[in-house]
Image (cartoon, rainbow, N blue to C red):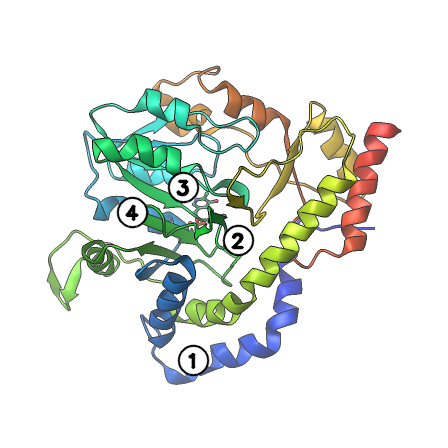
Amino acid sequence: MQVPFLNLAAQYESLKTELLPAVEKVLAGAHYILGPNVTAFEQEVAAYTGARFGIGVNSGSDALTLALRALEIGPGDEVITTPFTYIAPAESIHQMGAKVVFADVDPRTFLIDPVDVARKITPRTRAIIPVHLFGQAAPLAALNALAEPHGIQIVEDCAQAIGATLDGQPAGGIGRLGCFSFYPTKNLGADGDGGMIVTNDEALAKRLKMLRVHGIERRYFHDLHGFNSRLDEIQAAILRVKLPHLNSWNARRAAIAKRYSEGFAGLPLDLPVTAPGNSHVFHVYAFLSDRRDELQQFLADRGVPTIIYYPRPLHLQTVYADLGYREGDFPVAEAVSRRILPLPMYPELTDEQVDYVVAKVREFFLK
Ligand SMILES: Cc1ncc(COP(=O)(O)O)c(C=O)c1O
């Protein structure tokens, strides 16, 4: 049996009859930039996340960058984030000319650890970007308790966690700003790039709408240093077809995760842990193993290719050499990078495929 690591074509096949007319309607309507689908999708995502405003942008990376710009973060400021994630949040901080400050992660959830965040706060700290990694929310209550007394802003990176909740509240609508990615592999993926920022703050929403179109409120009158970063109208139309399916896709992901974890019972693995209060949407299902590399090869040889997220924590990446971090500075993130193995995870996986992966992992340990 072959179990592809991802299978985006399967989702397209299941939605083809809805997607093609939606795209055709945009093409025929000829309102290609910031048209009615972007406006409607912004309202739909805002409602879904319990926030008042949604601002569609070109990508999740731009969502973070524009969010920091809207908060007027710049040179001399520090922003704390996690070293165990995709590079985008750190990159957005660097793009503002602010200093990237890392805090280590929890060994079981891989989410940013508020105890280490507390150690990293200085009078220059302006914001924290917790990443809702792999589909569950970072510990926002603890982070907020640290941040609020100092006027530090929380910018949620929800790229991997649309639909996740924390104590019943949807991810994204809890912090000052919530940033989403609709990169094709995300739980809600466009057929191209896309992103969104949600917020309850009307003034920030207004500024973000200006920032995404070169800082204008009135055409050709530029009041802010802006960007060209708009959610594409065709992608918005596609995403509007997909959004109503998101909850059932997320439920299927959770069911697959449960099937994996039950199948792996008794094996020498650290299985994924859901933090109390979280509902997890399993963008990624990953466990830790001391024999990760051997197991990865064993699975690949048996039709189960896998990809390691993340093989090198951000503080050890070449681009951040000037920050002066060394190996050993974030021991948890480093150990997780060495031991983590993400498995195939998407709603279209069949139970037979999941059972095959389970059987091969069991065979590796019990052979
Ligand atoms: C945690 C995280 N933040 C930000 C991003 C950036 O999103 P995009 O690829 O849409 O720019 C990604 C993924 O791509 C991500 O995984």
Q: Position of residue 311 (x, y in %)?
A: 56, 31
Identified by mark 4, the residue type is Arg
Quarter assignment of residue 78: top left
Q: Is residue 297 left or right of residue 336?
A: right
Dividing the image into 4 quarters, which one contains the C terminus? top right
What residue is shown with label 4? 176
Task: Tell whether circle 2 marks a residue whose Cβ is less than 8 angstroms from ligand 1.
Answer: yes
Q: Residues within 10 Å of mark 2 (few under 14, many from 20)?
A: some
Separation of marks 3 and 1 at Cα, in angstroms: 32 Å
In the figure, is residue 256 to the left or right of 336?
right
Point out the tag, 2 or 1, that comes first from the N-terminus: 1
As measured in the structure, the alpha-carbon distance from the residue carrying label 4 to the one carrying label 1 is 36 Å
Name the N-terminal-most of marks 3 and 1. 1
Q: Residues within 10 Å of mark 3 (few under 14, many from 20)?
A: some
Quadrant of residue 286 within the rendered picture: top right
Which element is circle 4 on?
loop
Mark closer to the observer (2, 1): 2
Q: Earlier in the sequence, mark 4 or mark 3?
A: 3
From the image, tell me which residue sits under label 1: 27
Seen in the picture, residue 345 relative to 247 is either above or below; the reply is above
The residue under the point 21% across, 58% down is 202
Which residue is denoted by mark 3 in the rendering? 88
Mark 4 in CB contact with mark 2 (< 8 angstroms): no
Mark toward the start of the polypeptide (4 vs 1): 1
Q: Is residue 293 above or below residue 205?
A: above
Q: Is mark 4 within 8 Å of ligand 1?
A: no
Q: Is mark 3 within 8 Å of ligand 1?
A: yes
- Label 4 and label 3: CA atoms lie apart by 18 Å
